[in-house]
Amino acid sequence: MEKTYYNPADLAKFGNITEWQSEMGRKFFDYYGEVFKEGALTEREKSLIALAVAHAVQCPYCIDAYTTDSLQKGADEAQMMEAVHVAAAIKGGAALVHGVQMMNKAKELTM
Amino acid sequence: MKSLHAQHHPLADTSYQLTVLNSAQQVGKAWPAFASKLRETGLLPLRPTGISTLQLNVGKMCNQTCKHCHVDAGPDRTEIMTRETMELCLAALRQAPDMQVVDITGGAPEMNPDFRWLVEQVAALGRQLIVRCNLTIVVANKKYHDLPAFYRQHGVRVVSSLPHFSAARTDAQRGEGVFERSIRALKMLNAEGYGQEESGLVLDLVYNPSGAFMPGSQMALERDFKQRLRREHGIEFNHLLTITNLPVSRFLDYLMESGNYAAYMDKLVQSYNPVAAANVMCRSTLSVGWDGYLYDCDFNQMLELPVEAAAPQHIRDFDLGQLNARSIVLNQHCYGCTAGAGSSCGGATA
C-alpha cells in the first residue's frame, strides 16, 4: 500500500485518464490547452492565476506544475509569491466575510 | 566562485561529463541515444546545410563565473586564442565568402589582448560581426569603458546575456551585483545608439533560464523584457534570444548537485521537436576553439568532441567543401537544442 495519497510520478500520468473515458478526457485536454493559450491574458498571467488557484485548492500536482510553468514563462519569485498571497487573501476573506452572517444571526438571537 | 577546472572537480574532465550523459549508472536511468531520435526523423547522418557562420571562441578567460556556464569560464582560466590563430581564421574567411557571419565569443572575448585587432580585421572583410558581450566587462575596468563606441565604429551586433529583468534571478545565475552592472552597461550601449530605433545598431539580449527549466515563448518573454526594462530602467534593445541550458560543464554540475538532472533530461527528451532538429545551428555554423581546433558547435567544443575525423581538424587546414560534407558529431547534450521551440546561439529555431 502507498504510504501517501500523492505520488509526484502520477502527475506525468495525468493524460492516462483518457483510457477509461476517451471522449470526455480528450475534450477536457483540448479545452485545457485552449484555455492556457495567449489571449486577452498573456501565458505568463494565466500561469500565475493557475499557480494561485493551485494553492487555493491545495493541489500538490498543480503547485509543482505551475511553479515550473510560471518560471518557464518568465515569472520571478516576487510575482509567484504575490500570486499566492492573492489566493490566501481570497481564501481568508471568504472565511471572514461569513463573519457578517454570524453577526447577523447572533444579533437575531441576542438581546 | 572558482571554475570546475580550478577546483579539480571531476566534471572538469570532459570524459567524465560524457560518461554521466551516456551511462545509466550515474542516475539510475538512461535515455534513448540522440542519434536514434534523429534517425526516426530521417536526419541521420546530420549534415550541414552550408556553413554561413564562423564562431570563434577566443578564450575561456572571463570576469564572471556564472553558475550555468558551459565553457567553465572564469578569471582563473588562461586559455586564449593567439594572434597567429586569429590570422588563420581570417585566412579561412578570405577563402570562403559564403561565411557571411563571424560570431566572436568566449569567456569574455574582450579580455583577449588581440580582441580589438581581430574585430578590426573582420570588419575590414565586410562580414557581419557578432560579439557575445557579457555586459559587466564594459564597466569592469576603465580600459573597457569605450567598448560601446568601439562596437559602433565597427558595426558590431552586440549579443548580451541577461537572464532576467529582476536582479534576484539574474544575480542567482551570474553572481552578486551582476544585474546592476549589466544595467549600467546597457545604458552605455543605449547612449551610443545601440537598441535605438533607426540607429542600425543592433543590441540583442540572451535569456537563459536561471534554473532547471526550459525557456518559455521567445516572443512573450521579449515583450515582458522590453516592457520591464523600459519602464524600470529606460533601456531599449532589439530582440530577445531564448537559449536552453545544455547539460554541459557547470550547468551539468548544477543539475547533479541540485538533484534535477534526471527530471531535466526527461523534459528535454520528451520535448524533442523534429522541426527544431532540422534547424539546429550546427548545420550552418563552424566553431573554432581558442587553439584553432574545429568543432560542430561551442558545446561540442567544451565537451572536446572535435569535428569528425574525416574532416579538417584545425583552422589551418580549413576546406569549406570538406567541412560542408562532414557528418555532425552528436551526443546526449544535443537534446537541449531540439527541445520545445528549439535553441541555438540565435535563439529559438522552431
Image (spheres, rainbow, N blue to C red):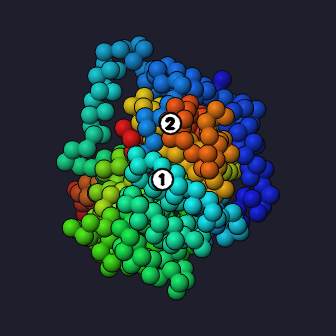
Give the labeled residue for mark 1.
B93
Name the mark on residue B344.
Answer: none
- Residue at image location 31% in from the left, 33% down from the top: A33
Q: Is residue B259 above or below residue B4?
A: above
Element class at badge 1: helix
Graded by Cα atoms within 10 Å as few (under 14), some (14 to 19) or many (20 or more), the crowding at tag 2 reads few
Quadrant of residue B69 within the rendered picture: bottom right
Tag 1: amino acid? Leu
The percent position of residue B184, horizontal first and vertical second, equals: 42, 79
Residue at position x 39%, y 78% in the image:
B149
Question: Is B335 in front, or is B310?
Answer: B310
- Look at mark 2 in the image and give the residue it sits on: B321
In which quadrant of the rendered view does residue B33 lie?
A: top right
- Going from N to C along the chain, the mark reached first, 2 or 1, is 1
Mark 1 Cα-neighbour bin, 10 Å: few <14, some 14–19, many ≥20: many
**In the image: residue B53, left or right of residue B218:** right
* Chain to which the residue tagged by mark 1 belongs: B
Q: Please, which chain is the residue tagged with disc 2 on?
A: B
Going by the numbered disc 2, the residue's amino acid type is Gly
| Residue B220 placement (x, y as % from top left) | 31, 51
In depth, the one of B62 and A6 nearer the eye is B62
Q: Secondary structure at mark 2?
A: helix
Q: How far apart are labels 2 and 1 at the CA level?
A: 14 Å
Q: Position of residue A50 (x, y in %)?
A: 36, 45
The foreground one among B76 and A13 is B76
| Image spot of residue A17 (x, y percent) | 42, 20
Q: Determine whether, in the image, residue B186 is placed left or right of residue A97.
A: right
Residue drawn at (29%, 27%) of the image: A30
Residue at image point 40% right, 46% down: B98
